[in-house]
Image (cartoon, rainbow, N blue to C red):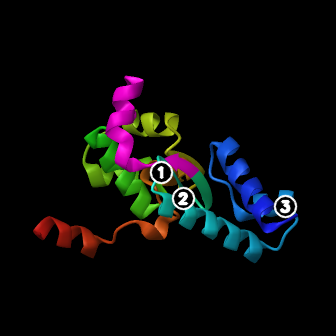
C-alpha cells in the first residue's frame, strides 16, 4: 500500500468512526508499525491545519478524531437550530471538577467539599457518562468510588487528565 493510500485509509477510518480512534486500533487494521501510523496521522493533522477548513483532526481522549473547526461553532449551532443543550450547570461543573481533581473519591467526599447534597448532580453526571463508578472504597458500607470517563476527556477536549490546569494556573488566571 502506497503512503498516499495509507493516509487516505486513516482519514476514512477517522471520518466514519465518530469516536476517538487509538493508534492501536489503526494498527490492528493497517498492519503497520505504530510509529509509521503516528507519522501518517501527524501529517494528516498538519495537512488539515494548513488547509484551514471546516473540519480538523485533533488528538483527544487518548486517540484521534475528526471534528468541526471550533471557529464555526456559533454558525453551525445557528445552522442546525440547536442550542447548546449539552451545557453543564454550575453545580455539575463544580462537582465534575472535584471528581476530576480528587478521583477516585466517594460521593460523601464530594458532598463534604461542596457542603451540599450531591445526589442529583452525581446522577446527572453519571447519566451523561462524564463520571463513572471505578470501584468500591474499603470502608464500612463499601461506598462507590467515582472517576472521570473518556467522554469527560472528549467533552473538554483533553488528551488525558494531565492536561487539566493546575491550581496555580487557575489562581493566576483569576488574578489577571
Q: Answer yes or no: is residue 85 visible.
A: no
Looking at the picture, tell me which residue is in the foreground, 73 or 50: 50
Q: Residue at x 26, y 73 (%)?
A: 169
Determine the CA span between mark 3 and mark 1.
27 Å
Determine the CA span between mark 2 and mark 3.
21 Å
Looking at the picture, tell me which residue is in the foreground, 155 or 18: 18
Q: Are marks 1 and 2 in contact (CB under 8 Å)?
A: yes
**Left or right side of 175 for 122:** right
Instruction: Quickly name the residue at label 1.
Output: 53
Q: Nearer the viewer, mark 2 or mark 3?
A: 2
Which element type, helix, strand or loop, lies under badge 3?
helix
Image vertical order of residue 51 relative to residue 85, above or below: below
Instruction: Quickly name the residue at label 2.
Output: 48
Determine the CA span between mark 1 and mark 2.
7 Å
Locate the N terminus and report the quarter of the image it occupies. Answer: bottom right
Looking at the picture, tell me which residue is in the foreground, 33 or 166: 33
Q: Residue furthest top?
A: 81
Amino acid at each position: 500500500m502506497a503512503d498516499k493510500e495509507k493516509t487516505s485509509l486513516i482519514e476514512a477510518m477517522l471520518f466514519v468512526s465518530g469516536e476517538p480512534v487509538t493508534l492501536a486500533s489503526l494498527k490492528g487494521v493497517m498492519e503497520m508499525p505504530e510509529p509509521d501510523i503516528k507519522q501518517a496521522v501527524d501529517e494528516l493533522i498538519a495537512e488539515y491545519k494548513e488547509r484551514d477548513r471546516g473540519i480538523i483532526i485533533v488528538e483527544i481522549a487518548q486517540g484521534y478524531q475528526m471534528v468541526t473547526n471550533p471557529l464555526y461553532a456559533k454558525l453551525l449551532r445557528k445552522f442546525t437550530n440547536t442550542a447548546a443543550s449539552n451545557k453543564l450547570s454550575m453545580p455539575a461543573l463544580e462537582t465534575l471538577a472535584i471528581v476530576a481533581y480528587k478521583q477516585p473519591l466517594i460521593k460523601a467526599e464530594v458532598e463534604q467539599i461542596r457542603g451540599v447534597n450531591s445526589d442529583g448532580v452525581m446522577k446527572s453526571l453519571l447519566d451523561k457518562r462524564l463520571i463513572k463508578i471505578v470501584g468500591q472504597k474499603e470502608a464500612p458500607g463499601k461506598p462507590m468510588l467515582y472517576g472521570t470517563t473518556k467522554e469527560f476527556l472528549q467533552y473538554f477536549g483533553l488528551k488525558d487528565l494531565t492536561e487539566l490546569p493546575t491550581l496555580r494556573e487557575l489562581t493566576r488566571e483569576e488574578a489577571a
